[in-house]
Amino acid sequence: MAFFKKPDVGSWTENWPELGTAPVNYEDSIDPEQWKLEQQAIFRKTWLQMGRIELIPKKGSYITRELPSVGPGTSIVIVNDGEQIRAFYNLCRHRGNKLVWNDYPGEETSGTCRQFVCKYHAWRYDLKGDLKFVQQEQEFFDLDKQDYPLKPVRCEVWEGFIFVNFDDDAVSLEEYLGEFGQGLKGYPFHEMTEHYSYRAEIKSNWKLFIDAFVEFYHAPILHMKQAEKEEAEKLAKFGFEALHYDIKGDHSMISSWGGMSPPKDLNMVKPIERILHSGLFGPWDRPDIKGILPDELPPAINPGRHKTWGQDSFEFFPNFTLLFWVPGWYLTYNYWPTGVDTHIFEADLYFVPPKNLRERLSQELAAVTFKEYAFQDANTLEATQTQIGTRAVLDFPLCDQEVLLRHLHHTAHKYVDRYKAELEAKSNGSSNGATTSSTTATQKDEVNA
């Protein structure tokens, strides 16, 4: 069910009473033990977005992904075998050497091949992961190549996005994405293949960066210099409030005004934006494709059907953001923790391929402008991390517009608490089993005596 709030009446947060309204404790962003639990409870048990199918468009195309968020040294290879997209642990079954890499084994790579050949002893695997050749096979003892395929990782595709999951017992990707996933089907992702990407190492907990993107309370202050003086003063005076919030299970979304193309008042934007018809909200000129006009959008986008709608941001737990803009383009964020106070931030922008130089420059301006905004957010987050780390204050009040922050930290704790309960149950089961065995042995000894 979607919730709507009339101006100055009620609140968003009251719609999800389980989240409460008390200050939120941020120790989960500075405790190393909590991070280790998150790694096992969250990143090894949920669906993780790896990229678009356009990265591996034909048979034999592959990419590798380094995933320290899942575990130290974890590396996978994702390949198009001509029939489906598959994922495998990136290691040879002979002696565990990393299978696919170029000059530096710690760096991600991509390419096209007919088979995977280990650099160490030349064991060969086909694109389905089956072992096909063993060097000097006759020297091994009762070796059956069928027993040594590459170890698979669950891999499924939704609307052209590749996901993997390291939990063999997890629900399907379709079920995991839930109502939001169903409600976004049909958006013309496949038309937007012009791709820009950024990657940065951020000195903050992964959840803090997501916190920054699920509220616009900060926008008039932190990004004031990005707007013209008159517009900046107006935003600072009256603030900024989103149009709509929603939470469905582990996932959430925020819908906002802004991003109109072109803006009603050209004095609101900078000269370069007026020239190129572009800026932070993307190119002003809508591409000539189906599926992006207000009456064509999938039902999950702009759920309030507001005329002033400009963008929607969907947060798929744990670390995948999918953000749509009214002019007809989208971007994604991924946050990959590497420690309790560090993570890798990935941003990918997708446009319909440009037809001329002006369109190309308008897309480049949007990509560069976005990067400036992201740097501003990242810089603030590192300052936040250092101060939370002092533990001088750990409980922080959140306003009504920060309801999705409450939800994120609540959901992360839910996964960790469930994982700890499972560990405790297994431990108790093992202890009970040992006690039973011991008791049985004692009873047998008494009978024998």
Image (spheres, grey):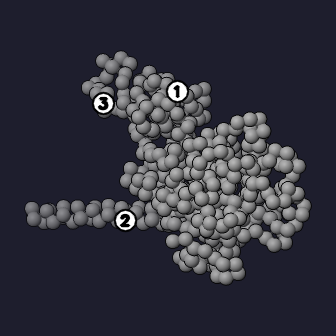
Q: Residue furthest right?
A: 229
Task: Evaluate if marks 1 and 2 touch, with contact meaning CB atoms under 8 Å apart.
Answer: no
Of marks 1 and 3, the one in the foreground: 1
Give the quadrant of the C terminus.
bottom left
The residue at which mark 1 appears reads as: 112
What is the C-alpha distance between the residues marked 3 and 2? 36 Å
Residue 29 found in image quarter = bottom right
Q: Nearer the viewer, residue 323 or 291?
A: 291
Sooner in the amino-acid sequence: mark 1 or mark 3: 1
Between 184 and 36, the residue placed more toward the observer is 184
Residue furthest bottom in the image: 9
Q: Is residue 77 above or below residue 334?
A: above
Q: Nearer the viewer, residue 132 or 25?
A: 132
Q: Which residue is mark 2?
A: 425
Quarter occupied by residue 398: bottom right
Residue 448, above or below 399: above
Label 3 vs 2, first from the N-terminus:
3
Amino acid found under the numbered disc labelled 3: Gln
**What residue is shown at x 61% (from left), y 40% (from top)?**
193
Answer few, some or many: residues within 10 Å of disc 3's Cα (few below 14, many 20 plus, some between 14 and 19). few
Check disc 3 and report the residue beneath it.
146
1 or 2: mark nearer the eye: 1
Q: Nearer the viewer, residue 338 or 296?
A: 296
Question: What distance separates the C-alpha of mark 1 from that of mark 3?
Answer: 24 Å
